[in-house]
Image (cartoon, grey):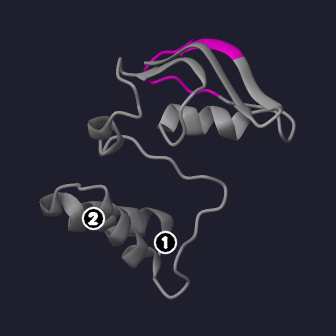
């Protein structure tokens, strides 16, 4: 469950979000649609705990996403629109890197990566 209660965020004189209230149930599929500069990325960055709201509260499964233990939670991640990948790494190498960075169990790593490589025809 994701819950936003009266969330506001501004960057200088630009108010990106103003009093946003919403609740998203677990296992829901949600599309965030809007014009450039309408606050979509700001909203996602707040939910991911990358930035803090100026006012209001954000909760992911009942916890503030900016809490240290939650930010390290291997079940949650955020990739912005400008993700920098190493062009020298293969798809499988990139998956291994992110698998390790997320702290996922090494016992399942090889099987998981092999499955993804086969599924998406990655080298």
- The question of residue 13 being in magenta is answered with no
Magenta highlight range: 19-30
Name the N-terminal-most of marks 1 and 2.
2
Q: Secondary structure at mark 2?
A: helix
Q: Secondary structure at mark 1?
A: loop
Measured as percent of width and height from the top left, residue 89 is found at 46, 83
Residue 37 falls left or right of residue 9? right
Label 1: which residue? Answer: 121
- Compared to residue 37, the image places residue 117 above or below, namely below
Q: Residue furthest left?
A: 107
Name the disc covering residue 100, or none: 2
Please tell me in which quadrant of the rendered image residue 97 appears: bottom left
Q: Residues within 10 Å of mark 2 (few under 14, many from 20)?
A: few
Measured as percent of width and height from the top left, residue 85 is found at 54, 73
Quarter of the N terminus within the rendering: top left
- Disc number lying in front (1 or 2): 2
- Compared to residue 71, the image places residue 5 above or below, namely above
């Amino acid at each position: 469950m994701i819950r936003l209660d009266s969330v506001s965020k501004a960057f200088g004189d630009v108010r990106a979000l103003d009093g946003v209230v919403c609740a998203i149930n677990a296992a829901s599929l949600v599309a965030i649609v809007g014009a450039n500069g309408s606050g979509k990325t700001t909203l996602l960055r707040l939910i991911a705990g990358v930035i803090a709201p100026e006012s209001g509260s954000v909760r992911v499964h009942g916890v503030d996403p900016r809490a240290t233990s939650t930010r390290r939670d291997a079940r949650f991640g955020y990739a912005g629109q400008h993700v920098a990948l190493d062009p020298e790494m293969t798809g499988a190498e990139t998956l291994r890197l992110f698998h390790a960075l997320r702290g996922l169990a090494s016992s399942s790593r090889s099987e998981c990566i092999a499955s993804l490589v086969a599924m998406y025809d990655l080298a």
